[in-house]
Amino acid sequence: MRNIALPGGDVVPVLGQGTWMMGEKPERRHEEIAALRLGVSLGMTLIDTAEMYGEGATERLVGEALDGLRDQVFLVSKVYPHNASRRGVIAACERSLARLRTDRLDLYLLHWRGAVPLEETIAGFEALRQAGKIRHWGVSNFDTDDMDALFEVPGADACVTDQVLYNLARRGPEYDLAPWLAAHDLPMMAYSPIEQGRLPKHGILGDIARTRHVEPLQIALAWVLSQPGVIAIPKAGTQAHVRANRAAHDIDLTPDELALLDHHFEPPARKYPLEMI
């Protein structure tokens, strides 16, 4: 598994595991837990979740899945913007820790920018960090202007990532957000890197996949993983899907294949507002 360094030196895998919409259907619980545990065994040791997902149900599932595995995992969760005041973020983190059955988060993110002043959120994050409840903090769904505003706040240089929607069909961050992050040595964390499976499986993705005897969505994930400074966190609710994602990590796209993908999924020629789903 290839790795990427966060500011401060911690190393995480470029391919992790997302959990959005997991833990919401009892009949899938056993398989979802098995999928997360398999992913960890295959080196996908970064697991991302949020208090918003299933209003805590997903965090509870992740906590159960990590029984006996916690020390092998880089665990990420996110706080609702309306909980992100100085006191609110501390209380929200404590609730997440209880659901996750752990005493600390490796990374805690502000899920998106809300009405609470960023100074308050950073103060809460720093209090949590000093108390050993979180090891790092960052943001999610922040566009370039949001990052500019964040970095005007004292203490913002402790931010270690921005998690955003990014895939072949959603390349807007490449125009100015990705260069901004690279200039500040911050990796970008890509959620929904295969557009929740909705990318076209015919056309160029299908053509490249056939020549390589893999699936089209594996090519799409391999493309995200080929981008410098990017961590991908696809969700996989079955063990077969986990194995397919892990195999995509080992697909080394050629310059010709990358050029074909650029031709059919064009990079942005102007600024687009950051998208969210």
Image: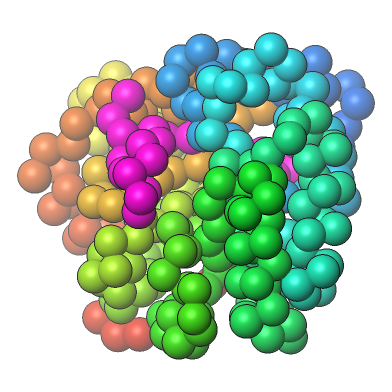
Residue 217 in which image quadrant = top left
Identify the residue shown where x is 35% and y is 74%: 177
- State whether residue 234 is above or below residue 243: below
Identify the residue shown where x is 82% and y is 69%: 87
Magenta span includes 18:
yes
Residue 275 x/y as whole percent:
53, 72
Decide which of 124, 28 is in the foreground and name it.
124
Left/right placement of residue 275 relative to residue 272 reads right
Quarter in which the N terminus is drawn: top left
Decide which of 202, 70 is in the foreground and name it.
70
Q: Residue furthest left?
A: 255
Magenta span includes 6:
yes
- State whether residue 99 is above or below residue 68: below
Residue 145 in which image quadrant = bottom left
Residue 82 x/y as whole percent:
81, 73
Quarter in which the C terminus is drawn: bottom right
Q: Residue furthest front?
A: 130
Decide which of 121, 277 is in the foreground and name it.
121
- State whether residue 258 is above or below residue 222: below
Q: Could one spot residue 122 in this view of the protein? A: yes
Q: Could one spot residue 241 in this view of the protein? A: no
Which region is colored magenta?
1-23
Identify the residue shown where x is 40% and y is 45%: 231
Q: Residue furthest right?
A: 26
Residue 170 x/y as whole percent:
43, 64
Residue 59 x/y as whole percent:
78, 38
